[in-house]
Image: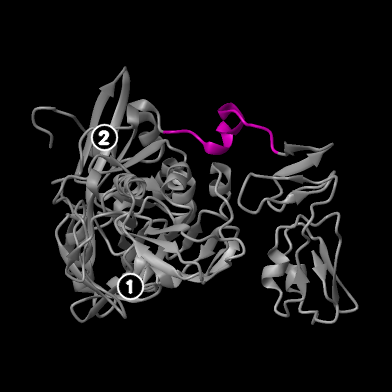
Amino acid sequence: MKIDTQKCIGCGFCVRDCPVEAVKLVKKKAVINDHWCTHCGLCLRVCEAEAITADETMPADAVECDACPIKCWINADHVGACQRYRNESGRLVRLTPLHTFEEVEQTVGSDPEEVIRKPVVTAIGSGTTYPDCKPAPCILKENRQGIDVVTVVTEVPLSYSSIIVKVDTDIPIGREGDRIYVGKREVGMVETEQYGSKMLHIGGVNRLTGENGFVIARTVTDIANRKPVKLRIENGSRLTVQVGQPPIIDGEKATKMRVGCGSATMGLFAPLLIEAADEVIILDSHITGQMSRHVAGQFAGAKATGVRLKFKESTPGRYFGDHGSGWGGTSIENPADIIDSIDMNIAWTAMTILITETTGQNGVMFKTTQSGGLSEIPLSKTARTALKTISNSCEPSRVSAIYTAGAGGSARAGVTKYPIKLTRAVHKAKAHLTVGGSPGYVLPGGGITFMVDVERVKQGSFYWTPTPATICPLEYTMKLKDYEKMGGHVEAMKPFDAKKPE
């Protein structure tokens, strides 16, 4: 990288963000240590004064790394931008050795022993522990493989609860942070997108105890029980979500979840796409891919086409998209508008360009004219095959949900006289928490905060009460000897009768 000291304003962003500390300020001007520099381009991208330009020729003793799209030039005895690879005598060496499971087992921690992985009985239909000091309604013992095992169950009313709804679609529904409404009542917010999914978070104790608590409790319960629920996004769409079903967005049923972002789609299908056209552009609201500049396209044999796109390029062939109601969830309504320019010194007359989305559901094909314009042509057979392959590789668009809650006082006091011992046993996998028989994921840190996939819980097992709170079936299963050590309510324990559980 080279710095124009006349343009440099000494803002320090290149110093702050450089991953290998190759830049420093000297007399309020940026200076680059060429031997440390990996040519990652980060300083160029953060420079407000556009004072930095990239070198065109890789140093003689450097090695180009192909572990990611950055393609660092790593100089001898130095590391790449990600700190994973080092150039040792012209050979890239991974700095962290390959680990066996035995080497990480202590960090990973133990799974619950097999004898306590399944509850003796579920809490579905068991009734609730209330008040806190009353033993749980069902404490059953069973001998498994010569070991006495006990399960304590209760249907727990939980004010500290919410539901995370995952909507698999690339159709825009709203911005991160937008409020979610049921009717006119606010129930949650739009969270971050996760790959090809929109995440909606509904509930939480602050909302449940607020003015809209009753409708929130009902909404969380209905979604968890897989009922259809109508939602409205602030500044966005109207949705009907039902766990296990495709979402209905502004009256239209979504059908496809994208196979990946535009870059990932290019990486997956480059050998097929190169047969479809001279240039391929995959529009996507997060990362749009361009075959001729993308590392996967070049690996497959794509040639330079002189095509430049309007979106901001992140790394070669990967462009940060935008959001809208157009192709691939972008603002591009007319696919040809993604092209900013075509350099006919590189391109050629009748060069073919295929533009599609990450679901492969829409596609259009052009050829270049002698003057560098575009003329639409019918999709070729190879283009149709490529689009069909992408589309068939997409999973169906559907709704799923994770119920999240914190097991409070009654949920623990009904199990044991010493709730802190139960909490510690759960985190040490000495006591196994399940929800309607389905394993819950216990979040790290204090307390017993858990998550469960509602599709693994018997439909209709969630309820709500006008405290307001949601109610879920919760089981703790452990060895009897561990239960006794934590001060369990052994006086209320009964043997399990498979024919008639109490």
Q: In this orientation, does residue 322 appear? A: no
Q: In this orientation, does residue 48 appear? A: yes
Q: Is residue 118 left or right of residue 111?
A: left
Q: Quadrant of the C terminus?
A: top left
Question: At 57% across and 38% down in the image, what residue appears?
Answer: 107
Magenta residue span = 96-111
Question: At 19% across and 58% down in the image, what residue appears?
Answer: 242
> What's under tag 1, amino acid-wise?
Ser
Q: Earlier in the sequence, mark 1 or mark 2?
A: 2
Position of residue 360 measured from the top left corner of the image (x, y, whole percent)? 33, 54
Q: Nearer the viewer, mark 1 or mark 2?
A: 1
Question: At 24% across and 30% down in the image, what residue appears?
Answer: 141
Q: Quadrant of the N terminus?
A: bottom right
Q: Which mark is residue 119?
A: 2
Position of residue 85 measured from the top left corner of the image (x, y, whole percent)? 72, 43
Q: Secondary structure at mark 2?
A: loop
Q: Is residue 280 left or right of residue 259?
A: right
Question: Does the magenta-highlighted stretch encompass residue 107?
Answer: yes
Quadrant of res 361: bottom left
- The answer for how far apart the CA atoms under marks 1 and 2 are is 48 Å
Q: Which residue is mark 1?
A: 325
Whether 93 is drawn above or below 39: the answer is: above
> What's under tag 2, amino acid-wise?
Pro
Question: At 13% across and 27% down in the image, what residue appears?
Answer: 498
